Amino acid sequence: MPPHCPDEPQALTLKELQERVKAWVDKNFSDGLENRPEHQALGMAEEYIELGQVIGVVVRGALKQAQGIRPETWQREVFEDAVADITIYLIAFCACEGIDWAKAVEQVWEGVRNRDWLAYRRLEEQNL
């Protein structure tokens, strides 16, 4: 199906996503108590803990599988949910602090993508 078909949802830009998250936070937490950066930071921390637990399950399953002991499975959906929850809290935190999340990500990405880790690694090896 071509991307211009009206039935197909369009991907949001980072800026559009931040605007929608901010509008949702403002609507749902208009009393201001949970519409503060510290609340969003606590939410992120809680979601990071959840993600850490999921990663623990993944690592444990990989270890058990490598050892040939009872194979364990993990649910990708749980992992995806934890990552998405962290992202939403981060976007809301940025919105509360007046940080342009999209601009910040794009600026940092520009620096990261210009790094040549292979060249750096070769240079380090030469200096050993």
Image (cartoon, rainbow, N blue to C red):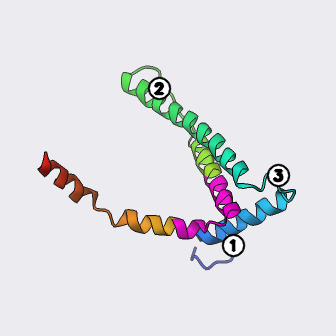
* Residue at figure coordinates x 83%, y 56% from the top left: 32
The residue where tag 3 is placed is: 33
**What's the residue type where badge 1 is placed?**
Asp
Q: CA distance from mark 1 to mark 3?
A: 38 Å
- Mark 3 touching mark 2, by CB under 8 A? no
The residue where tag 2 is placed is: 71
The magenta segment = 87-104
Q: Residues within 10 Å of mark 3 (few under 14, many from 20)?
A: few
Residue 12 is at least partly visible in this image: no
Indicate yes or no whether the magenta region holds residue 9: no
* Residue at figure coordinates x 79%, y 52% from the top left: 34
SS at circle 2: loop
Q: CA distance from mark 1 to mark 2?
A: 41 Å
Identify whether 4 is placed above or below 108: below
Across and down, in percent, residue 83 comes to: 58, 48
Q: CA distance from mark 3 to mark 2?
A: 45 Å
Identify whether 9 is placed above or below 68: below
* Residue at figure coordinates x 37%, y 22% from the top left: 67
**What's the residue type where badge 3 is placed?**
Leu
* Residue at figure coordinates x 39%, y 66% from the top left: 111
Across and down, in percent, residue 120 comes to: 23, 56
